Every structure is written in C-alpha cells, then in structure tokens.
Image: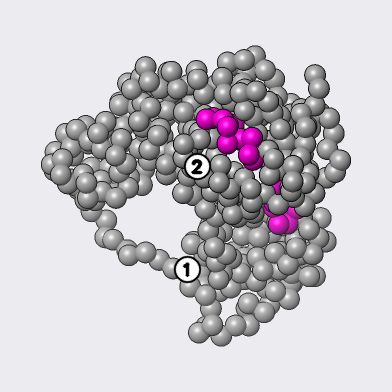
Amino acid sequence: MSLPPTLTTTEQVKEFSAELEKYPVIAVDLEADSMHNYQEKVCLLQFSTIDTTVLIDPLEGADLGSLRPVLADRQVRKIFHAADYDIRSLSRDFDIEINGLFDTMISCQFLGEERFGLADVLRKYFRVELDKQYQRADWSRRPLSPEMIRYAAADTQYLHELTEILETKLIEKGRLEWVQEEFLLMEAVRFADHPEFLFLRFKGAGLLKPRQLAVLENLLQWRDKEAQRRDCPLYKVLGNKEILEIARQMPTTVNQMDHLSGVSSRLIGRYGKRILPEILAALDLPDAALPVYPRGERRAKDPQIEKRVIRLKEWRKQISAELEIDPGVLINNALLEELARKHPTVEQDLAEIDLLKNWQRKVLGEGILQTLN
C-alpha cells in the first residue's frame, strides 16, 4: 500500500484547497502533541475525499489560510469523528472555522452504540484494526515513520462510507434531526481564555479553604513555569493528585512533604526543595490577600425539587432504555436539575429552559411534563 502524499508548502496547500472545493463531502482529522509538549499544537492534518487521501504538515511552515473558505463553507459537508478537540484546535492554531459538520462519534452515541471510539467503530463496520500505540505518539517529531503516516491516513479513509451507514440508520430511527442540532452546537466550541487564577480550572479547588487555595495557586504557577521550561505537559512535572494533597496539608518542611499520603518520595526528592518556598510564600500572605473560590448563588435545599429530580432520573432511565441511548447523552443531570427547579407545567414553559435543546423539547417534552406533574 503506497503512502498518501504529504503537503509541506503554502503553494501546495493552495492548490489542494482549490481541489477540495470540487467535492461536496470531505473527511477531516488531525494529530496533535498534547501528550508530549508544553504548548500543544496541531502537527498533522488529514483529508480524505471520495477519491483520495492527502496529509498536510503544518510544522514545515506552510500557510493554511487557503483552507479557511472551503472548511467554513456550510454547503461542503465535513466529516469528523469526535470533532470537539479538533474544532477548538483548528480555530486556535489557524483561525479555521468548521461549518457543515457531520460527527460520526455523536452519530454513534445517538444510535446507542456501546463503543464509539474510532478504533471500535472501524473494527465493527469494516474489520479494520488501528494500532493504538500511535494514539499517544509524539506527532511533533520528524520525520514521521511510514507506519504513523498509514495510521493517520486510516483515520479519515473510512469516514465517507461510515457516514453513509450511520446516516441511513439515523434516518430509519428518526434521529437525523437530533444529531444535526448537536452538530451545529459543536461547530461553535472554542477553547476558553486563560483564567487569572489557575486554580479556577483545577478539579477539587472548590473544596479548599482560602489559605489552601493560595498554596495550590502557587504550586500550579510553579508547575506551569517548570513545564514551560522543560517543554513538557504539566502532568509530567507533578500530577494533580499530588498537588492537591500538598495544598490540603500545607507542609512547612520537606520532611513533612515526604510523609504525605499518595505523594512519592521520588517526587519529593526531585522537587521538594524547589516547591517549599512556594508553599511558605502562600502561608505568609495576609488574610486580606488570600484568594477566594467564586461561588454561585447558594440555594437552600428544597425537598420538593429533590423529589422532582429523583422522579426525572427514574423517567430518564426508562426512556433511555426504550430508545437504547445512554442516559447522559439523552439528557444530562444539569438539565434535569434545571427542569426540577423551574418546574415547567405546560409546553410553553419548556421554551424558557435555556439548556433544553429543540430536539429534546420535541421528543422528550411530553414525558418531562407528565413526570413533573
């Protein structure tokens, strides 16, 4: 099997972009280096038309601006599998917008597929085996091996045929309109801006007291600088569990750090003396300078609302079994709680529930009202 061509120059990308405009459907994927570098970036793009597969190597310096018109053209369908990260990355790295999306992973979820990773789906429908070792490969290294190139090409080569299969099934089940709304919402996703405090994006920070938060923030800032210096992902410096435990306990000596649960002696031996000043600096802050975790409006517990949530979850379990869709895909917990709190009683009230999607209102609205009333 011959390798697909890899484009490396701006002129080659321009010529290929013009060629793409001739096709009503193109399949797209990308490879990034988030497992290996501090600042993740798109390292390879894969495109498959019905006729051919072509790779683009952005690390060679080619300008990808010529791809913007065709990828933003809603009249040209773009097939992705699990588009969320790809859409965010293309916007961040190249200011590329995706319109006309068809996401095969979302389609699989709404068809009730138990396994919807690309490797599982290709195995099921085409008996194709993807080598999972390349999922964690360093795609920023050059040259790419022939095996990596073949793996990357396989990510898009089967998406056209897969889309035909899935779309037929969605139409048969009457769910094509459901996923089309999901696709439109997915097209708008973007990476969030960098927060003022790193702890705002750290799981578990909301359970800490202000002094512990100050320690956590200093540790996170130190880890960020260290990862940037070494050009590696954050987790390769110090894991989240270890950082959270240190912030909780606020040790004042390296010896105390070495006795913390879940924090290895190897890590303390390597970083203990370097992170100790960050902890002590946080402990020296005056109370007025301590960070405070932002809280939403605290609502008093309402037994009636809690009962409604329980009833809604029981109803969701039943309807998801009937439709053979995962309950969280059908309607998530945040929406159930919003419905229980606002307690719509008639169909018009459902329009006031911002989290409720149009397809959910049409398909699930009657069941929601009956359950609540």
Foreground residue among 95 and 360 = 95
Q: Residue at x 57, y 64 (%)?
A: 194
Q: 180 or 310, which lies in front?
A: 180
| Quadrant in which the N terminus is drawn | top right
In the rendered view, would you say 239 is above or below 170? Answer: below
Q: Which residue is drawn at 32% across and 63% down?
A: 298
Helix, strand or loop for disc 2: loop
230 sits left or right of 106 in the view: right
Kind of residue at badge 1: Tyr
Q: Nearer the viewer, residue 349 or 76?
A: 76
Residue 183: mark: none
Name which residue type carries label 2. Answer: Asp
Magenta stretch bounds:
17-43
Residue 313: x percent and y percent?
Answer: 31, 36
Task: Please identify the quarter of the rendering in which residue 317 is found.
Answer: top left
- Identify the residue at horizontal 74%, vertical 48% (top origin): 10
Q: Tell me where residue 107 appears, x and y as whole percent.
A: 46, 28
Q: Which of marks 2 and 1 is nearer the N terminus?
A: 2
Q: Give the residue at mark 1.
A: 293
Tell me where residue 9 appears, x and y as whole percent: 77, 46
Determine which residue is flagged by label 2: 73
Between residues 27 and 201, which one lies in front from this camera angle? 27
